[in-house]
Amino acid sequence: LDAQDSILSSNLSNEVNVGEKASNDRVRKLREKIEVNSLKTPTMSSMISIAAEKVQNSDNGDEGNETSASSSSGVFKFDDINGMADEEISTFIGSYEENKCLSEMISQLNTEDFEHLFRADPSFMDDFRWWCRVCLRARRYRQKRAIQLLKSYADWRLSSEIYKADQSRLKDQVETGFLLFLDDVRCVEGRAIIVIRLALHDPKKFQPKDVVTALHYVVLYGLKSDPIVQAKGFTVLMDMSETGYSNFDMGVASAVSKALNSTFPMRYGKL
């Protein structure tokens, strides 16, 4: 806002210096803009409103169409209880109807649920629309469940401070090969595959929190690799071969189970 005020003040000065060529009406309007902007302060509600407006104004259709996905096309059938059938998801992704469904979801959000995270982690706010879409797809377009997932993930992201993770430590663990995302490989249900090779885990070096951080990185990589993964989800393969007592850590099993089932913004198929 300070930058905007400076630009507007500069424009006002330029207008006045022009002398007779300056329009009194334009000067007045510029002064009004300065006065209005000096009183404005950005709020979380305005940020959410902007996100919703961007979705509504996307170029995937006409604004006059129905907002309900099932009634606007007559093809996609789902509700907030059953969600969308897997066989229809690939066609629905990226469609005008999906954007309308996303807009409806964003309009239902309570901004206070995300205010602290927005302030602590601006990157989450920058990608807020993307996170909303990921959660919506993960819950097969059931808006209420998508909102619950988004809140749960936001709370965990804030409490865990995952955005402050030690990148060098994360790199060290990922490079062990303990966690793998199999690019371009899908299970029979069409889900992406994550492999956990327990024999490569060293509990003395990496704590359960480190494992969850690395798993979050792998999941995020998978979500960004393909929109279909966001909707179809993940199958996790636990490779126990060549595993000894030195590799076991019950805290890791508990942390991973909780992250996959209720924390991460993903659809978890099976282990």
Image (spheres, rainbow, N blue to C red):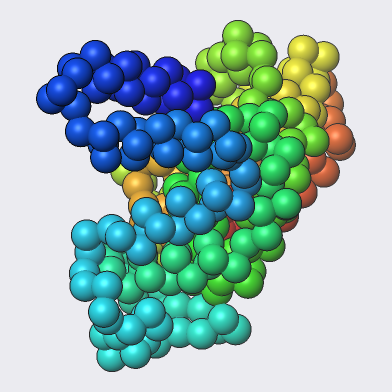
Query: Where does residue 155 sit, x and y in percent of width and height?
Result: 75, 45
> Measured from the top left, where is residue 253 in percent x and y?
79, 41
Extreme residue in the right direction:
250
The image quarter containing residue 95 is bottom left
> Image quadrant of residue 52?
bottom left
Q: Is residue 13 above or below residue 89?
A: above
Residue 237 shows in the view: yes
Q: Position of residue 29 (x, y in %)?
A: 34, 39
Q: What's the residue at 37%, 54% (across, down)? A: 54
For this rendering, which residue is in front, 244 or 74? Answer: 74
The residue sitting at the front extreme is 20
Q: Residue at x 80, y 22 (%)?
A: 207
Q: Residue at x 43, y 71 (%)?
A: 101
111 with respect to 254 (left or right): left
Side of 61 where 259 appears, left or right:
right
Residue that lies at the very extreme toward the left in this rendered image: 21
Of 221 and 182, the residue lying toward us: 221
Residue 235 appears in view: no
Residue 108 lies, in percent from the top left, at 60, 68
Q: How many marks?
A: 0
Q: Quadrant of the C terminus?
A: bottom right
In this rendered view, identify the residue nearer to me: 99 or 145. Answer: 99
Query: Going 27% across and 20% down the picture, which residue do you hit?
Result: 16
